[in-house]
């Protein structure tokens, strides 16, 4: 789960890591100390360039600025919360991050002297990039201090706390950009992007964050697409969509209905599909291992009854109990086809693409 | 698994120790089992919160092959488990995988046995149900398989493509290799490098997700580490350059495997 900036900074604060003093603004009229930096809390990057960060010096300008930010659409999102932070007296900005690197199956410390929004312009070779684990944090602190040019007494407590926070909170990515060195000689986390491991939620009952856009199971590919698809399993769902495109048709969506395909999930899928303007056919590709085809068939029949005009269904079921499923569907005049290829051919006929 | 010929000597469950289920005795711990039996493989189905402990118990018991079917194992848990498995020289497959099917011999996991038929193909795949699609499709063409290995879809996994390619290349019974990958991560790129330098047998590859929209990455870490483009297109190109036969859809791959 990707956290909003203020949610990430709350976690840093709990970890005794220095963040700017701040207030959360939930609606226009909330009071804040001035001068302040207002930051729109949206679940996407690049807000700075789109007006999502505003400095306010005087009271007269505050409410108007807050109101504008609540109404500012940034890449399709408007904020529920605005973070109002003290204005930092910035002497230097750096980049420091901890992340799980799947390629090396390790946690890595990545840093650069020049932080800020243009950090990607730096050449890859200049970055500090080291594996880090609980046996070498001290050594990494020495190296980070030397690399950034600071006293290790300043860097070490920060890195120790960042690492500890990373482990305690099942963090996948903890990016501080910029890590600000203030004119007072303090290191403060100017911005933080944090991603937590959803699989670890069971051991964090205190996790309570704003609802985030969920992108996993139903993805819109083309609002004008002609073929909708439903499959069980992410790989099979992607493969089904690829196969539709390879036959020269325009897939509208990706949908992984998962192992528990039931009436509710199928109905939800159909409801989303009929919202598209141009669907000519729905291809359903279910390969049942633990899932049972007859349960999927019942779900399709029940869901179909609840929707008035559903585009033609081209269903391929294989695996556990598939003969029973075919019988159930044929009794309702819903045809099934034995292979994905045949479904695609039939869908192509129906869609005249 | 029993029906498919797997020799299950025992099971473990803290609550059911002492029972016999489907003819298989249940013990409390692996150590208890090892007093009575030699164990060379374990298949783990325990729920995610307990999977790490189960895998660590198996590693401590020196079981040479561990297959973890469980979905949703926390990433940090897997970092710990993988480090220990690698240090102990133990082969770990998974987690979040359907396991291994050796058609006609053995089933270690949840791949339906009737999807496969004995033969000379080695299949390695990150997917679950897409693996079934591929295996069933080849079986329908009477192109049988020696191994069907689902390595799973998680960020941190015990066995990757390269490990399986090495196994298949060095097995004289295997004549062709089928590789099924997905968008995300760089394991298929590593596979391409390995194919170019170490694999002489024909490789038939399909990467799912050609039509997937490019993910919006969070922060800059991905771009900095150079791993930002993990698309089906890039991986397919790399595999083709390495000498693999590549396809844009699973149906094309199934039709083309020899």
Image (tube, rainbow, N blue to C red):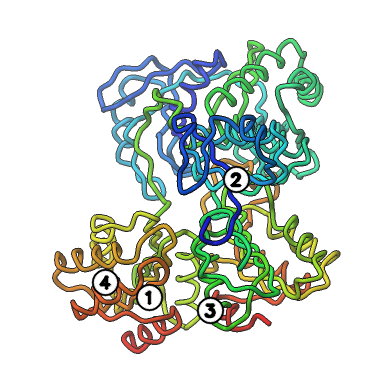
Q: CA distance from mark 4 to mark 3?
A: 28 Å
Q: Nearer the viewer, mark 1 or mark 2?
A: 2
Up the image or down, B73 lies above or below B210; here it is: above
Lower sequence index among marks 3 and 2: 2
Task: Name the foreground residue: A122 vs A147.
Answer: A147
> Residue at (33%, 19%) from the top-left corner?
A59
Q: CA distance from mark 1 to mark 2?
A: 38 Å
Element marked by disc 3: helix
Q: Position of residue B228 (x, y in %)?
A: 63, 52
- Quickly name the residue at label 3: B251
- Mark 3: give few (<14), some (14-19) or many (20+) Cα within 10 Å: many
Q: In this orientation, does residue A174 appear? A: no
- Quickly name the residue at label 1: A316
The C terminus of chain A sits in image quarter = bottom left
- Quickly name the residue at label 2: B9
Both marks 1 and 4 on one chain: yes
Q: Nearer the viewer, mark 3 or mark 2?
A: 2
- Mark 2: give few (<14), some (14-19) or many (20+) Cα within 10 Å: some
- Quickly name the residue at label 4: A277
Element marked by disc 2: loop
């Amino acid at each position: 789960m990707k956290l909003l900036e203020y949610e990430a900074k709350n976690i840093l604060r709990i970890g005794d890591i220095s963040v700017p003093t701040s207030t959360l603004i939930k609606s226009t009229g909330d009071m804040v100390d001035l001068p302040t930096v207002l930051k729109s809390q949206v679940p996407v990057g690049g807000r700075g360039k789109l007006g999502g960060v505003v400095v306010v010096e005087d009271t007269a300008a505050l409410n108007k600025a807050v109101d504008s930010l609540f109404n500012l659409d940034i890449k399709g999102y408007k904020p529920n919360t605005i973070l109002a932070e003290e204005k930092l007296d910035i002497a230097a900005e750096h980049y420091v991050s901890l992340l799980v690197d799947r390629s090396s199956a390790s946690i890595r410390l990545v840093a650069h002297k020049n932080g800020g929004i243009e950090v990607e312009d730096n050449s890859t070779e200049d970055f500090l990039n080291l594996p880090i684990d609980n046996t070498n944090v001290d050594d990494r602190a020495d190296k980070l201090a030397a690399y950034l040019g600071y006293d290790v007494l300043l860097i070490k407590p920060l890195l120790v706390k960042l690492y500890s926070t990373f482990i305690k909170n099942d963090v996948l990515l903890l990016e501080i950009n910029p890590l600000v060195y203030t004119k007072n000689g303090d290191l403060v986390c100017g911005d933080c992007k944090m991603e937590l491991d959803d699989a670890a939620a069971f051991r964090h009952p205190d996790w309570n964050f704003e609802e985030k856009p969920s992108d996993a199971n139903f993805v819109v590919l083309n609002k004008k697409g002609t073929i909708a698809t439903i499959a069980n399993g992410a790989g099979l769902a992607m493969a089904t969509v690829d196969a539709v495109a390879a036959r020269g048709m325009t897939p509208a969506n990706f949908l992984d209905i998962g192992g528990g395909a039931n009436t509710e999930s199928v109905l939800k899928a159909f409801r989303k599909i009929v919202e598209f303007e141009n669907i000519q056919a729905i291809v359903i590709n279910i390969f049942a291992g633990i899932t049972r085809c007859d349960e999927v068939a019942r779900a399709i029949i029940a869901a179909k009854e609840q929707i008035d005009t559903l585009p033609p269904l081209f269903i391929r079921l294989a695996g556990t109990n598939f003969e029973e499923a075919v019988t159930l569907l044929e009794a309702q005049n819903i045809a099934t086809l034995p292979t994905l290829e045949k479904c695609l051919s039939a869908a192509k006929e129906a869609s005249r693409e | 698994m029993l029906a498919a010929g797997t020799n299950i000597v025992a099971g473990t469950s803290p609550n059911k120790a002492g029972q016999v289920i489907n003819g298989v005795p249940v013990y409390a711990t692996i150590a208890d089992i090892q007093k009575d039996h030699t164990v060379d493989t374990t298949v783990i189905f325990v729920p995610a919160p307990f999977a790490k402990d189960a895998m660590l118990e198996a590693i401590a018991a020196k079981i040479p092959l561990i297959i973890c079917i469980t979905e949703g194992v926390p990433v940090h848990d897997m970092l710990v488990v993988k480090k220990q498995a690698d240090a102990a020289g133990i082969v770990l497959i998974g987690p979040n995988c359907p396991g291994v099917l050796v058609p006609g011999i053995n089933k270690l996991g949840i791949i339906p046995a009737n999807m496969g038929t004995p033969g000379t193909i080695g299949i390695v795949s990150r997917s679950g149900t897409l693996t079934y699609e591929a295996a069933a499709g080849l079986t329908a063409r009477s192109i049988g398989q020696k191994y069907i290995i689902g390595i799973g879809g998680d960020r941190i996994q015990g066995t990757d493509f390269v490990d399986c390619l090495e196994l298949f290349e060095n097995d004289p019974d295997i004549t062709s290799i089928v590789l099924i990958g997905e968008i995300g991560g760089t394991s298929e790129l590593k596979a391409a490098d390995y194919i170019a330098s170490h694999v002489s047998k024909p490789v038939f590859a399909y990467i799912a997700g050609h039509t997937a929209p490019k993910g919006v990455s969070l922060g800059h870490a991905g771009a900095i580490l150079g791993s930002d483009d993990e698309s089906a297109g890039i991986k397919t190109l790399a595999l083709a350059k390495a000498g693999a036969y590549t396809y844009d859809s699973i149906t094309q791959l199934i039709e083309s495997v020899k």
